[in-house]
């Protein structure tokens, strides 16, 4: 896939002015806004609820990309979809019925993504790839921002890209965790096309400069 997308994660934004932060990265060239939802149950952290999604929805026309690190997920899916999410991704370990959860997301008019942790086997895609819109490969263990990229996950990205190629479907391949200017090209070469970056963007002095540098590395 030749079209690349940069998805700033608001987990690393300044929460005291979150709306301004989202507007700023949108103006700086972001392609979507990534919302990391953690429940202090599936992962050891607590972040955003549906009301944050509702508050951000009027501020940008960019897709709101909701990553649910929560269990169970089905009720949250309904709430985030109603509050303006465009893409909703979940972990197969966080639901009893993966196929039903995929269908629920799509019934609410959202694109559905399946998330693979570093140790989650790719065979979860054997029975779901034909139904989903995106695969999210975690390049860190979920739960906290600012972690270092796990180099071993590049092999998983390559494997998932080959599975997508063989399927003949247009499925996005998102990579999340430790993405920065230095490694984004290698992640793209492995097959990623959508890149979640938190601290690398929100920790920069100029959002437009850092997003521009990322896109330059991808060109």
Image (cartoon, rainbow, N blue to C red):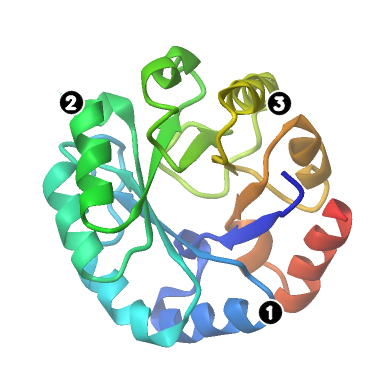
The image shows a total of numbered marks equal to 3
Disc 2 is placed on an element classified as loop
Q: Going 77% across and 46% down the picture, which residue do you hit?
A: 184
Q: Earlier in the sequence, mark 2 or mark 1?
A: 1
Q: Going 29% across and 70% down the picture, which residue do you hit?
A: 84
Estimate the x, y position of residue 119 in percent, counting from the top left: 47, 17
Q: Residue furthest left?
A: 75
Q: Which residue is mark 2?
A: 97
Give the mark toward the camera: 2 or 3: 2
Q: Which residue is mark 3?
A: 151
User: In the rendered image, which quarter is residue 164 located in?
Assistant: top right
Specify the label residue 28 is tagged with.
1
- On screen, residue 60 versus residue 69, left or right, reads right
Specify the label residue 180 is tagged with.
none
Q: Is residue 19 above or below residue 102?
A: below
Q: Earlier in the sequence, mark 2 or mark 3?
A: 2
Rounded to the nearest angstrom, the CA distance separating label 2 from label 3 is 31 Å
Observer able to see residue 39: no
- Quadrant of the rendering where the C terminus is positioned: bottom right
Q: Nearer the viewer, residue 38 or 58?
A: 58
Rounded to the nearest angstrom, the CA distance separating label 2 from label 1 is 39 Å
User: In the rendered image, which quarter is residue 165 located in?
Assistant: top right
């Amino acid at each position: 896939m030749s079209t690349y997308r940069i998805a700033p994660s608001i987990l690393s934004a300044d929460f005291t002015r979150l709306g301004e932060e989202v507007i700023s990265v949108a103006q700086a060239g972001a392609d979507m806004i990534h919302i990391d939802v953690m429940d202090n149950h599936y992962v050891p952290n607590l972040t955003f609820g549906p009301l944050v999604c509702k508050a951000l929805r009027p501020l940008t026309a960019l897709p709101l990309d909701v990553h649910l690190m929560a269990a169970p997920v089905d009720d949250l899916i309904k709430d985030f979809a109603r509050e303006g999410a465009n893409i909703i991704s979940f972990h197969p370990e966080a639901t009893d019925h993966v196929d039903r959860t995929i269908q629920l997301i799509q019934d609410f008019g959202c694109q559905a993504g399946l998330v693979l942790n570093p140790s989650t086997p790719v065979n979860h895609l054997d029975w779901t790839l034909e139904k989903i819109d995106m695969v999210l490969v975690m390049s860190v263990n979920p739960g906290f921002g600012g972690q270092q990229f796990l180099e071993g996950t590049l092999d998983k990205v390559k494997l998932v890209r080959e599975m997508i190629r063989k399927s003949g479907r247009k499925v996005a391949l998102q990579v999340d965790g430790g993405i920065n200017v230095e490694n984004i090209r290698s992640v793209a070469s492995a097959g990623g096309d959508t890149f979640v970056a938190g601290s690398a963007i929100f920790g920069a002095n100029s959002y437009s400069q850092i997003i521009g540098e990322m896109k330059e590395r991808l060109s």
